[in-house]
Structures are given as C-alpha cells and as structure tokens.
Amino acid sequence: MKLYSINTGYFKLDGGAMFGVVPKVIWNKLNPADENNLCNWAMRSLLIEDGDRLMLIDNGIGDKQPESFMKHYYLNGTDTLEGNLAKYGFSKSDITDVILTHLHFDHCGGSIVREGERLVPAFKNATYWSNEVHWKWATQPNAREKASFLKENILPIEESGQLRMIPVSEPADNRLGLTKFTGNISVRFASGHTAAMMLPQVQAGDTTLVFMADLLPAEAHIPLPYVMGYDMFPLTTLTEKKMFLEEAVDGKYILFFQHDPVVECCTLHRTEKGIRSKDSFALSNRFPV
C-alpha cells in the first residue's frame, strides 16, 4: 500500500466561522487572519494505492464554478489536483474509487467537470462513494446548509450511474460508527458537522491513519471547544471529538488533516490540558513514496 498527499489548492474562509466560540485573540495566533478576517486553508486529498485500486478521498473545489462564486473564496497557490496526481505518475483516468467524505463544495467540487454544455464525471473510470443518509441530506438541504450543497457538484454523479453507497454504522461502545470498505480501509461516521460525514480509516501494517475531514479540519481544532461555526450540531461534534480523540490517543493513530494550511499529519498525547498534538509531520515522512 502507498499513500500520497494530494493538495488541490488553498482557499480562504472567515476565521471566526472556522473557530466558533473561540475568541479571535486566541485563534489568530494559530492561523493569522488577513485584513478581511479571512484565514487561508488547504483543500488536501488523500490518494491510496492498494493492489489494483487507486482510491481518492475528496477532490477539492474544482474549477467549473463562475467567478461570481469563486471570488468569495480567494483561491490561491499553485497546487492543483491534476498537477499533484501527475507528480506521482497518475491521471484522473487512473482513479478507480472516489470516496466523498461529504458533499460540501470544497470537498466534492472536483468530482464533476464541464464539457461544453454538459456536466460529466471528472473521474471517468471511477466509482463514486457516498452514503444514503448524507446523500438525502445533501439533495434535500436545510436552509442553513443549502449554500454548501451545489446541485451541479452532486446530481450529475448519480445521473452518470457511477454512484454507490456505503452502509452507515451507528456509534457503539463510545466510538464512532465503523463500516468495512476494503481489506485495509474502513469508514467512520460523524454527524456533528453534517449528517453522516465519512472519515476513511486506513490500516497500513501496524499503523492506523484517519482522514479527519471536517471533524478536525486542522491541528488547531484538536482542543474540544474548538468547534466550527459551520457545524450543524456543535454539541454532537463535541461528543464525537471526545470519543474519537480518546480512541485515537490510545490506538496511537495518525491524524491526516484536510484543511490545515501547514500541518499534514500528527500524533496525539495526553497533557494536563487534555489531548493535544504530539508530533506534526508530512505524510511522506511516515509513508515514503
């Protein structure tokens, strides 16, 4: 098995929204805001090469949205999905599976591309994976979350016939629900940020790595009160974080961060202030390619 960090680019979001009730005087030391109170964030995907499967977890914001939409998010940097796949000798046509943690635009926008007047899958040979609970939530959105679920990112996946669903597992024994996906990959479920968000968990020998999606967008979000204002159910997030962090520190898991602008991965340890990051490092430090 080989693991590759694939950064699809950077974008900016309001710092207050990203850190919820945490005061700016504190969070601004962790990810300094610009003059518009915006912080820069990565849109980092994980590519897993396992036997004859090449699996991509999430795919960034894409490039098909109009300038009137993109201008609010200040895309920046030179990283692209295509460029970083090519760096490792791959193209989008090589992808066999696209696992979508959830269907917010910054996680699934690269799923679909425009070909003339048509909206078609960007990964023509891939199966796209969601789950029925989240799919219904995204295609029948509530008013608060509706702006994050763009129909042009979502409905063409189903229309293509390439969509499949992963069964949802409920929490048990103070742990997030867990569904087996392949021999080496399982999927955890969390519903504080949005309904039935999926957190892929990779078993590489004796090492467990978890793709944190928006349960822990960045290393700075490890302390329990650091819950995003974007979360639909913040108290559920608080409970899910506590359960996961206890399991992760005991299991010596590696956490892979999707949105941290600097830190790709970390391990955990217990401190007087609670569970905190122990060692921070690039994915390639533990999984050379």
Image (cartoon, rainbow, N blue to C red):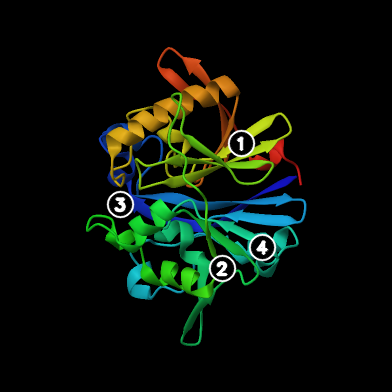
Q: Are marks 2 and 3 in contact (CB under 8 Å)?
A: no
**Residue at the spot of label 3:** 35
- Residue 160 to residue 167: above or below: below
Left or right, 98 with respect to 235, comes to right
Task: Look at the image and tell me whether residue 145 can be seen.
Answer: yes
The Cα atoms of the two marked residues, 1 and 3, are separated by 36 Å
Give the residue at x 62% y 72%: 124
Residue 83 image offset from top left, x and y in percent: 64, 64
- Determine crowd level at label 3: few under 14, some 14-19, many 20+ residues with C-alpha closer than 10 A: few
Mark 2 vs mark 1: which is more N-terminal? Answer: 2
**Residue at the spot of label 1:** 209
Give the residue at x 35% y 44%: 193
SS at badge 1: strand
The amino acid beneath tag 3 is: Glu
SS at badge 2: loop
Left or right, 175 with respect to 26, comes to right
Q: Please give the label number shown on residue 162.
A: 2
The amino acid beneath tag 4 is: Ile
The Cα atoms of the two marked residues, 2 and 3, are separated by 43 Å
Task: Give the quarter of the image for residue 287.
Answer: top right
| Disc number lying in front (2 or 4) | 2
Q: Are marks 2 and 4 in contact (CB under 8 Å)?
A: no
- Residue 47 to residue 105: above or below: above
Given residues 213 and 81, the one toward you in this image is 213
Mark 4 vs mark 3: which is more N-terminal? Answer: 3
